[in-house]
Amino acid sequence: MAGITKRQALAKGMALGAIGVAAFASLCGAAQANTDTGAWPDRPIRLVVPFPPGGPTDGAARVYAEALARQLGQPVVIENKPGASGAVAAGQFRTAAPDGYTLMMMVTPTIMAPHFFKNVKFHPATDFASVTKIYDLPNVIAVNAQSLPKVTDLKSLFQYAKAQPATLDYTSSGAGSSGHLSMELMKSAKLHTMQHVAYKGSAPAMNDTLGGVVPVIYADMVSALPHIRSGRLKALAVGTPQRVKALDGVQTMAEQGFGGYEASSWGGLVAPRDTPRAIIDKLSATSRQLLATDEVRDRFEKIGVTAAYLNPQDTEGLIRSDYTRWGEVVRTNGLGAE
């Protein structure tokens, strides 16, 4: 210490200490970055499905989860949390840890839920981090083939309904579903007079349609396709802008002169809002790869959905546009909240 004053020694010690703190912080930052990106995932991932087992969202989620698990090298465990078109699950998921180990399927009915149900505690466009669109789920208007044997297309359905005022009902996958709102939009345009019979899910609605209790259904393709193929249901129109490969002979609504009333659903992946961007990007890139494989595309097609990747930005934009579009339909037609 010869030639160095006590003050100089103290200053040098403080400088070295500052360098040490900075180096330690840098190491911590690197470790944190490694936890967020390089080491992720190093344990099982939980995928929340806001609908019960057996439905279209659950079926598509299981195909996707199995493929994602293989790509990431970690199990992806499905957790079903049904209720209020997904609002129950979304409200709980909103406070999940943003670490990439809890993800959720975001689907069209859940995007609509804040417009349709009271006390919904989430906003689909701002409370979550969009990751990717996964699939498109076409909808189809169908009738019980025995109950309405002379109804062959939308025009004959609407003519029959007007001739039977207040006696012919229809159902859908649930109150606030895209099928329900599209049919109500058509009713406001005086195209039909049918009343909606609400069920809690596509399964009970389909059961009563097959039993003739409610002879008309605006259903998702997953629940309807097996019964259309068996002949128990007769498909009248698909609610997509283009025809669906699985029902190539069935015209779209626009082809039958009813453009503007299309309604189809889709499903995608969201994460808690503050999930690190590196994890979001890795999930998105991985999803893009697996959704392009023949295996996933074929398995999706067999259950009635179509693989449809979108990047995080476009997925967020789709959520925002759907939220705005269907909110306007709810308000304009006085459907209100339940």
Image (tube, rainbow, N blue to C red):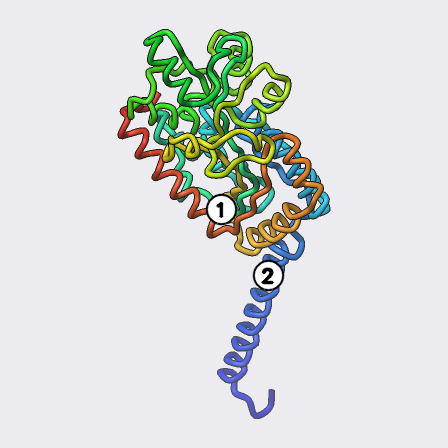
Residue 206 lies in quadrant: top right
Residue 336 lies in quadrant: top left
Give me the C-alpha separation between circle 1 and circle 2: 28 Å
Classed neighbour count for the residue bearing mark 2: other residues with Cα under 10 Å, few (<14), some (14–19), many (≥20): few
From the viewer's side, name the closer residue of 293 and 212: 212
Would you place residue 25 above or below residue 234 in this image?
below
**Amino acid marked by disc 2:** Cys
Look at mark 2 in the image and give the residue it sits on. Answer: 28
Would you place residue 311 above or below residue 1 in this image?
above
Dividing the image into 4 quarters, which one contains the C terminus? top left
Residue in the picture at 63% in, 45% down: 291
In the image, taking residue 10 as reference, residue 46 lies left or right, namely right
Dividing the image into 4 quarters, which one contains the N terminus? bottom right
- Mark positioned earlier in the residue sequence (1 or 2): 2
Q: Residue furthest bottom?
A: 3
**Amino acid marked by disc 1:** Ser
Would you place residue 184 above or below residue 126 in this image?
above
